[in-house]
Image: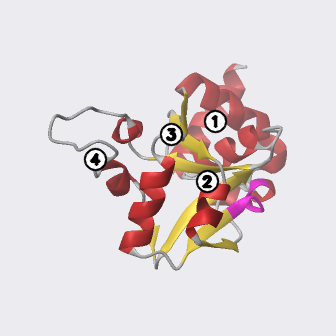
Amino acid sequence: MSQYLIKFSRKRAWDIIPYEWLESGEVQCDPITDLRTRDGKLSIWEIDDKLSNLDLVLSALACTRERFDEVDYGMFDPSIVEDLGINVELSQGNTPVPKANKYHRDLAKLTVSGLAQLVNNIFSNIEKDRRLEAEIRKLILEVWDQDVDHKRIHKKLGELVEQELRLN
């Protein structure tokens, strides 16, 4: 079964921290502030059951940045979204790696309460992970020649990649 991937801005926001003021079963609000919504939509990525497209999606996300940097993300079961009745729209991703963009989805028509329910339901079940800078560098270099639209890359990242390629 496939999984959904959410890119984190702050992975630590998703840590379970037992604040003494937090009632049992409650989640601190930090994960909500880590999710960037726009026009009632939350960007997610569908990762296949064998995770065969995970590296491609991570390289696509990394190619939207100015430099090589770690990528934090979480993966969760799509049934959580279905059970909450949240609309999932197929939408073309907007990364410089066109091959990866077909895996993009939007959770649409989200309300504040809907987003809060989503975070509450995925919080304790999300698989958090981080790809370190060296791994991200390797992923970008692997897709650079064949899969990346170089016109859509930030100039600084393009210079760093070209420098890496000259060294190797």
Report the magenta residues as a range: 100-104
Q: Nearer the viewer, residue 125 or 72?
A: 125
Locate residue 5 relative to residue 114 in the image: left or right: right
Mark 3 or 1: in front is 3
Residue 124 position, x and y percent, is: 47, 40
Mark 4 or 3: in front is 4
Q: Nearer the viewer, residue 20 or 126?
A: 20
Mark 1 or 4: in front is 4
Q: Which secondary structure lies at badge 4?
A: loop
Query: Is residue 111 among what the camera can see?
Result: yes
Report the Cα–Cα distance between label 3 and label 1.
9 Å
Callout 4, which amino acid?
Gln
Report the Cα–Cα distance between label 3 and label 2.
10 Å
User: What residue is pinned by disc 3?
Assistant: 67
Report the Cα–Cα distance between label 1 and label 4.
39 Å
* Screen quadrant of the C terminus: top right
Q: Which secondary structure lies at badge 1?
A: helix
Q: Earlier in the sequence, mark 3 or mark 1?
A: 3
User: What residue is pinned by disc 4?
Assistant: 28
Q: How is the image coloured?
A: secondary structure
* Residue 153 circle label: 2
Callout 2, which amino acid?
Ile
